[in-house]
């Protein structure tokens, strides 16, 4: 993508994210409608829907040739990565949004012909915007994030994962996950995949492992982590697929192989 075009898209997206964030903050204590989706704990609210609608309207008005993939269904039916695609999670961490009124993010990844151009992860209540721009780096509120080059090893690493991974499941060998929990320095679970990616990019968490993410959960994060020299793959080591749900390991390169070879045993 041409740099000037990318800069224009960046400026628009950033402006819309700040506007959407303000709208969300204004509604945070409202009595909005809460529904469930795939199961009783899979929440969605009126605010998730209206936020995605807000972005879809702005994008269609300004960039009618672009495509939209959105969690709440206001996007297009996209089955190829050709052209420019905005991959949007209007609220990542809806359970946190509803229960905690914090610790959730707007996540937008902008891809051109399958290449990640710009990633935005906006922690709405903390007013912290993480951005990643292809070839230019990743930033936290405009401040450049360092490359993940500092020596890390598993024993001194913090790993983000959901505690359910340590329970018996059909997806992953829980015994190996239990060993990982014992061997690493500590684990964290933030309840927003996008923020967990941002923390890996920031270097305050060394890896994030999860068994099922949709493209809108990781599209932005992948760009950010890439820009600081980290790496994102499926939990079997294969490249991720932006058109499907994936298992995900995003991490500092230095512990990637140890995690894949010693601790991640998919069933
Ligand atoms: C969820 C969050 C959560 C992750 C789930 C996602 P949502 O997104 O990122 O941390 O574990 O897999 O679906 O539903 O709040 O947008
Ligand atoms: Ca999500
Ligand atoms: Ca969501």
Image (cartoon, helix red, strand yellow):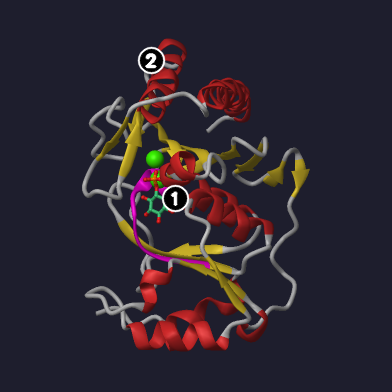
Lateral position of residue 238 relative to residue 186, left or right = left
Q: Residue at x 48, y 40 (%)?
A: 97
Q: Residue at x 47, y 54 (%)?
A: 191
> Would you say residue 213 sits in the magenta stretch?
yes
Q: Position of residue 10 (x, y in %)?
A: 60, 28
Where does label 1 land, which residue? 218
**Is the CB atom of the residue marked by disc 2 within 8 angstroms of ligand 3's nearest atom?**
no
Asked which secondary structure carries label 1, the reply is: helix
Q: Residue lying furthest right in this view?
A: 143
Few, some or many residues within 10 Å of mark 1 (<14, 14–19, 20+): many
Ligand 2 in which quarter: top left
**Residue 64 tag number:** 2
Few, some or many residues within 10 Å of mark 2 (<14, 14–19, 20+): few
Decide: is 185 above or below 247.
below
Which mark is nearer the camera, 2 or 1? 1
Who is closer to the viewer here, 254 or 157?
Answer: 157
Which quarter of the image is occupied by the C terminus? bottom left
Lateral position of residue 203 relative to residue 39, left or right = right
**Is the CB atom of the residue marked by disc 1 within 8 angstroms of ligand 2's nearest atom?**
no
Instruction: Kindly indicate the quadrant of the structure image that contains residue 51.
Output: top left
């Amino acid at each position: 993508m041409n740099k000037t075009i990318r800069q224009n898209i960046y400026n628009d997206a950033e402006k819309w994210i700040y506007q959407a964030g303000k709208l969300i903050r204004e509604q945070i204590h409202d009595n909005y409608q809460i529904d469930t989706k795939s199961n009783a704990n899979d929440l969605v609210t009126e605010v998730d829907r209206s936020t995605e609608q807000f972005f879809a309207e702005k994008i269609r008005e300004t960039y009618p040739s672009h495509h939209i993939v959105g969690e709440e269904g206001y996007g297009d039916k996209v089955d190829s990565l050709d052209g420019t695609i905005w991959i949007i999670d209007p609220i990542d961490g809806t359970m946190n949004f509803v229960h905690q009124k914090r610790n959730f993010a707007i996540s937008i990844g902008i891809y051109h012909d399958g290449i990640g151009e710009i990633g935005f992860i906006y922690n709405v209540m903390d007013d912290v915007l993480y951005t990643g721009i292809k070839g230019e780096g990743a930033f936290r509120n405009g401040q450049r994030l360092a490359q993940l080059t500092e020596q890390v090893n598993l024993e001194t690493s913090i790993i983000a994962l959901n505690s359910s991974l340590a329970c018996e499941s059909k997806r992953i060998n829980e015994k190996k996950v239990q060993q990982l929990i014992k061997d690493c320095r500590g684990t964290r679970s933030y309840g927003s995949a996008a923020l967990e990616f941002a923390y890996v990019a920031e270097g305050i968490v060394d890896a994030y492992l999860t068994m099922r993410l949709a493209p809108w959960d990781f599209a932005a994060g992948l760009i950010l982590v890439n820009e600081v020299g980290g790496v994102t793959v499926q939990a079997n080591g294969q490249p991720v697929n932006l058109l499907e749900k994936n298992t995900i390991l995003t991490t500092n390169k230095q512990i990637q192989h140890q995690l894949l070879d010693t601790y991640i045993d998919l069933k």
